[in-house]
Image (tube, rainbow, N blue to C red):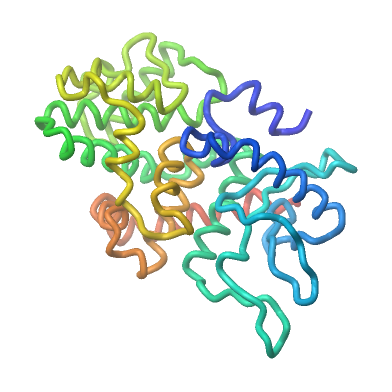
Amino acid sequence: MGCYDYWKNTMSVFNTAYDTLACSAYSPAIAQITKQLEDALVTGMLEPSPITPKVRFLKEVAGVSNNIPAFAHPIYIRNPRSPDEEVVVVDLRFYGSIDQRTQQFTIRNQAEANLATNRAYLNAVWLFSDPKMLQSTSPLGMSVYASWIGEFIAKRLSLNPKEQLMLTILAAYFYCCQFDTTGEFDEDERRRLASYISRNVPCSVRDAQEVIGEELYLHNLNEFCAATYDATKAITMKNFNSRLLFETVKGSWFGGTNPRELVAVALEHPPTMLAIILAAIEDRSYRSTVISRLVERKAGKENDKNFVRAINGLIQQTFASY
């Protein structure tokens, strides 16, 4: 059994962007692209990344044509001739072209190429290592994620401060659920999460415990949206759904090949969320985005540096033995 099969049987969350609600309509096309990429892996068309062969780059090659359609998010594949070989593939053709002088593929948009490759590295950590390593590396991911959702929805639906706080706690809890491999939390884990959330939202432990309750577990974005009314008791949240959430956050980012889809994916896919935060810190071209301003407010310069150091260190450590 490969790691993807294992995750599908144990996780309540999503292995790649194409498993999320935002990309659910792509399933037939991605199945075909996956097969083409597996054939390309066998024939050596996918270039190993400089950090690890567990991440492969799809690039243009001078004088060689391929009919693999473009894909915007990293894809997991397995070598059909050697099923133990599992990799994540990122399509870099969006961000470069063949240099006519050298006949080599050259990156033309470094910022977006960095975002794409970091998404692939983090997705590989997510799949091939313990996903909770991404959670424990830094609380900044949860803090930014929860505030992003809480602030945007509060403004859109005119929530009062208490309603916004309870929604932010629920978002933080949903973020934590996305790293879980069990499908349930016992009493001790709920107490631990309430304490963790209270320190990083911040809020009182009592408020966190009130939202988390004794049985609530959020498997996906639709369940999160359905839980918002009970958490906030706000009448404007009564018919809240994923479509309204997508519409609310769509202007948060302008990087990537499809920024609206990118942030929609990030709602259910922590590797994408963390890669966006990393880009917000590392590249000044994203500084005017809403998420970048939120990261700056939540982190500060020193925590910015700590987050970058921690994420890059985790990537290097995870793949040091490959």
Q: Is residue 191 above or below residue 293?
A: above
At horizontal 11% and vertical 32% (from top left) the residue drawn is 161
Instruction: Classify residue 247 by image quadrant.
Output: top left
Residue 74 position (above or below residue 102): above
Closest to the observer, 278 or 196: 278
In the picture as drawn, the residue positioned furthest to the top comes out as 214
In this rendered view, identify the residue nearer to me: 38 or 301. 38
| 109 to 102, vertically: above or below | above
Residue 240 place in picture, x, y as percent? 27, 25
Q: Could you say which quadrant of the image residue 142 lies in?
A: top left
The N terminus sits in image quarter:
top right
Judged left or right of residue 39, residue 127 is: left
- Image mark count: 0
The percent position of residue 37, horizontal first and vertical second, equals 75, 50
Q: What residue is drawn where x is 45% and y is 54%?
A: 258
Instruction: Locate residue 303 relative to residue 103 in the image: left or right.
Output: left
| Image x and y of residue 95, in percent | 56, 68
Q: Nearer the viewer, residue 79 or 22?
A: 22
Residue plotted at (84% across, 60% down): 44
Looking at the image, the residue that sits furthest to the left is: 160
**Residue 98 at what x, y percent from top left?**
67, 78
Instruction: Note whether residue 271 is visible.
Output: yes
At 51% across and 71% down in the image, what residue appears?
110
Does residue 314 appear in this view? no
Residue at the limit of the structure toward the bottom, as seen here? 101
Left or right: where does residue 47 sit relative to residue 307?
right
